[in-house]
């Protein structure tokens, strides 16, 4: 063995992949487009306008520009700027009684909120629980923390939420681990676009309340896309009082989506519990994790987002800017739903959000066939994820045509191998 072949990396770190599969596909699509090919890239979770430019809210740009340089350059408090945290809590909970049951910390985007939740609510070598269709970095973050993620089937045969599968998964976790962290990414689920209706939320809340009578339970609601949802976007808050009877509820909030500021890396984890002493423990634990990982979060972003949330004039303008983008996305959703139905594509209920899943017997094969004609989507097990947030409305016929061709090829090969 030569000196060059000896690695000081730990054994676990030596086999790591250095890039995310979605970013890798995005990079390939961009390289082909730069070489002159006609490429439709429906991979990334960033909202683009119909000219293919990243959508920017003018109010946000102004808020960032008017923060005094000297103030932005200083450290923020470890757990985050108190005015920012208060503004985020009110953005989620309003002035309801729930506000008084909450504490919060600043995180680097929604990913930091997920990290906080898994680190502090899942024991080492234990598993969190979420739906089988889920955001890919959930297990990546968990495995980095020497934890993992188990899943339960998300859909019943009629493509409604499979409540019984969730209950069974919760029961198994509590029996085997003695505790549970349940992660639910609704409304506007990534990657399927599914949003729970009122009855589904209330049924889930009762199941969570019942589980909390048996063991320590925390529920993380990943609300990354809730500002871009349809009529069901705000139903989640009605489920909180029932959950809080027995459990800790965690809310992941991010400016990446709410204010189209993916690069600013500003997010928050809000924790709710009815007991004052437990809230103090929650605040201390989350603050400790901040210091032990990223330490202080982006101060400029916190200052700007605080203004966007609390300054009446600026907040109204931000709401108006976002409403234009919500409308842009809504027209794409309607156009896609219509074209997908006409093409016989199999999709879940979808009324808003950045993504939709299209079911196929082989996601990898379908995505590969689509790449051959210059259309990029993200392969999943049994589906492909389509980022309508990055797809101009005029390109939806091309997208659906490629989806149909890719699924037909996958079905043909699946039939031959059956």
Image (spheres, rainbow, N blue to C red):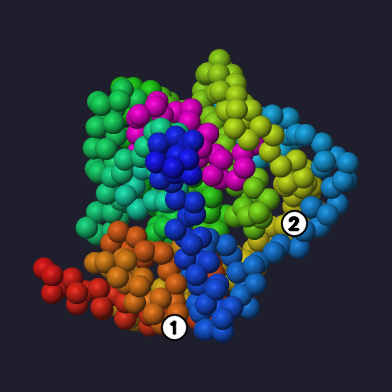
Residue 294 falls left or right of residue 343: right
SS label for mark 2: helix
**As drawn, 415 above or below 270:** below
How many callouts does the rendering have?
Answer: 2
Badge 2 is on which residue? 60
Q: Is residue 295 above or below residue 303?
A: above
Q: Is residue 367 magenta?
A: no
Dot label at residue 327: none
| Magenta residue check for 125 | yes
Residues at marks 2 and 1, CA–CA distance in whole angstroms: 33 Å
Give the secondary structure at mark 1: helix
Residue 73 position in % (x across, y down)? 82, 41
Please state the extent of the stretch shown in magenta in the rendering.
104-129
Give residue 180's quadrant in the image: top left
User: In the shown orientation, is residue 120 left or right of residue 100?
Assistant: left
Q: Nearer the viewer, mark 2 or mark 1?
A: 1
Quadrant holding the C terminus? bottom left
Residue, x 13% and y 70% (percent of image)? 417
Q: Which residue is mark 1?
A: 398
Quarter containing the N terminus: top left
Q: Where residue 401 appears, x then y in whole percent?
A: 38, 83
Q: Residue at x 49, y 51 (%)?
A: 18
Q: Residue at x 29, y 34 (%)?
A: 170
At a point 22% along the width and 58% down the height, the residue shown is 157
The disc, 2 or 1, on the residue closer to the chain's N-terminal end is 2
Q: Please say whether residue 187 is visible from this viewpoint.
A: no
Assess disc 2: are there few (<14), some (14-19) or many (≥20) residues with their C-alpha within 10 Å of its C-alpha. many
Question: x and y percent of residue 175 in the render?
Answer: 25, 26
């Amino acid at each position: 063995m030569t000196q060059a072949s000896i690695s000081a990396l730990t054994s676990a770190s030596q086999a790591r992949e250095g890039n995310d599969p979605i970013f890798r596909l995005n990079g390939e699509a961009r390289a082909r487009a730069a070489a002159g090919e006609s490429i439709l890239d429906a991979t990334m979770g960033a909202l683009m306008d119909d000219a293919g430019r990243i959508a920017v809210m003018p109010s946000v740009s102004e808020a960032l520009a008017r923060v005094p340089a000297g103030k932005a350059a200083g450290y923020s408090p470890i757990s985050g700027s108190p005015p920012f945290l208060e503004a985020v809590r009110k953005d989620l909970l309003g002035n309801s009684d729930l506000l008084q049951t909450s504490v919060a910390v600043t995180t680097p985007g929604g990913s930091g909120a997920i990290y906080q939740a898994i680190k502090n609510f899942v024991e080492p070598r234990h598993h969190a629980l979420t739906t089988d269709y889920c955001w890919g970095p959930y297990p990546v973050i968990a495995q980095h923390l020497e934890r993992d993620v188990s899943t339960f089937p998300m859909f019943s045969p009629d493509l409604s939420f499979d409540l019984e599968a969730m209950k069974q998964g919760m029961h198994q976790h509590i029996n085997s681990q003695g505790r549970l962290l349940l992660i639910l990414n609704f409304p506007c689920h990534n990657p399927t676009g599914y949003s729970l209706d009122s009855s589904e939320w209330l049924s889930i809340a009762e199941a969570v309340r019942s589980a909390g009578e048996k063991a320590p339970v925390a529920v993380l609601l990943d609300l990354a896309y809730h500002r871009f949802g349809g009529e069901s976007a705000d139903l989640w808050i009605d489920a909180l009082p029932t959950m809080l009877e027995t459990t800790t509820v965690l809310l992941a909030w991010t400016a990446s989506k709410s204010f189209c500021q993916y690069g600013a890396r500003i997010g928050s984890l809000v924790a709710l519990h009815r007991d004052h002493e437990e809230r103090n423990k929650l605040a201390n634990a989350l603050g400790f994790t901040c210091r032990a990982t990223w330490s202080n979060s982006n101060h400029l972003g916190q200052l700007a987002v605080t203004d966007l949330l609390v300054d009446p004039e600026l907040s109204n303008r931000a709401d108006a800017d976002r409403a234009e983008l919500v409308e842009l996305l809504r027209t794409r959703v309607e156009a896609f739903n219509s074209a997908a139905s006409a093409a016989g594509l199999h999709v879940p209920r979808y009324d808003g959000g950045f993504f939709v899943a299209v079911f196929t017997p082989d996601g990898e094969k379908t995505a590969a066939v689509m790449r051959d004609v210059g259309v990029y989507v993200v392969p999943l097990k049994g589906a492909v994820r389509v980022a309508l947030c990055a797809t101009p409305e005029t390109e939806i016929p091309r997208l659906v045509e490629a989806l149909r061709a890719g699924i037909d090829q996958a079905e043909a090969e699946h039939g031959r191998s059956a």
